[in-house]
Structure formats: structure tokens, C-alpha cells
Image: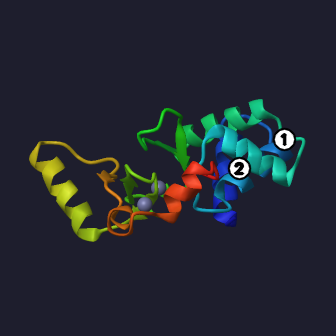
Amino acid sequence: MESEIKKRFDNYIREKGLRKTAQRDVILEAAFSSDDHFTAEELWMKARKIDPKTSRATVYRTITLLLECGMLREIDLGRDERVYDPNFIESPDHNHLICIDCGKVVEFEDENAAVLIDCITRRLGFRPTSKSMRIEACCDKLRSSGMCENLIELRLGKK
Ligand SMILES: [Zn+2]
Ligand SMILES: [Zn+2]
């Protein structure tokens, strides 16, 4: 995890008048050590791998703090559960393509798409504050070869 992330969170904690705790640091590490999106339960699992004593309530409270300070964003993957995305710090305008067949999520950035969204928003008389789009798509691999390793993983419950 980059120290910038830790610094930013520490500043926010201080502004809020909260104490720095080792538990929150563990959760921060679990959240930002990879690009993976996660649910609260998944984050709890990751955090417990670093420190088995991490409490579930602290995970939920820390997620709220991270959302408040804009370090984490909730994204809509069309699932029933809340999914959080740690990648908006590095790429604030990134987009998601979601495969409706196998559930794979592909993150991408595109300058032209960002400019286009910007133009449309301004033409409608607004200023964009975040430019993220979501594309739902069919799995090409599944259609052409009849199977997709992602779907197999999904069915095995690994994802
Ligand atoms: Zn993302
Ligand atoms: Zn697929």
C-alpha cells in the first residue's frame, strides 16, 4: 500500500477528531493492497488474514469513513450486495464493463469517453463531478468457445 493513501486517511481521521488505531490500519491495508473490488464481508476476511482479531464492526465503520472522505466508492455491479472499489484514487475516471454471463468485471480508462461524457454533461448545463460509466456486456468467450474460465470459477463459488 502506498504511503500517500495512509497519509490521506490519517489526515481525515485527525480532522474528524478520531484516534489512529492499529485495527483501522489493518483494514486500510486490506482494502488498498490490491485492485480487487470487495464487499464488506470480503474486506473483513482479507483484514482477518492480516490480523485475525479484526472486528467486523470496525470493518463496517471504516468503510463508512473511507466513503465519506472519498477514498472508496460504492459501485453498482448489478449485484444484490454492496460492492466497494478502491481504485478511484489512482484512476478517478475509470469505467466498468460487466459481463452479464460470467460476472467478470473489466476496468478501463478511455480519454475519448471521458471527453465525450464531459461534453454531453456541459451541453446539458451541468458540470461533471465524477465520470464513470458502466457497460453491461455478453461474454464473447462463452459464445465462441462455449465456456469461460470465469464462469467455471463463479459456479465453483470461488468468486
Ligand atoms: Zn473499479
Ligand atoms: Zn466470460
**Any atom of ligand 1 within 8 Å of the CB at mark 1?**
no
Mark 1: amino acid: Thr
Q: How many marks?
A: 2
Above or below: residue 37 compared with residue 61? below
Kind of element beneath mark 1 = loop
Residue bearing the label numbered 1: 54
Seen at 80% across and 38% down, the residue is: 19
- Crowd band around label 1 with a 10 angstrom C-alpha radius: few (<14), some (14–19), many (20+): many
Camera-side residue: 126 or 24? Answer: 24
* Dot 2 amino acid type: Asp
Residue 10 - label: 2
Q: Quadrant of the N terminus?
A: bottom right
Assess whether mark 2 and mark 1 are in contact (beta carbons under 8 angstroms): no
Give whichever of 96, 127 is nearer the camera: 96
**Depth check, front residue: 131 or 11:** 131
Q: How far apart in space, not on screen, are marks 1 and 2 (Cα)?
A: 19 Å
Quadrant of ligand 2 in image = bottom left
Residue furthest left in the image:
123
Q: Nearer the viewer, mark 1 or mark 2?
A: 1
Tell me the residue at 34%/52% (across/down).
132
Place of residue 67 in the rendered image (x, y in percent of width and height, measured from the top left):
55, 40
Please say whether residue 62 is visible from this viewpoint. yes
Q: Position of residue 113 (x, y in %)?
A: 23, 63
Residue lying at the far top of the rendered structure? 57
Q: Classify 10 Å Cα crowding around label 2: few (below 14), some (14-19), many (20 and above).
A: some
Label of residue 7 in the image:
none
Q: Position of residue 145 (x, y in %)?
A: 38, 69
Helix, strand or loop at label 2? It is helix
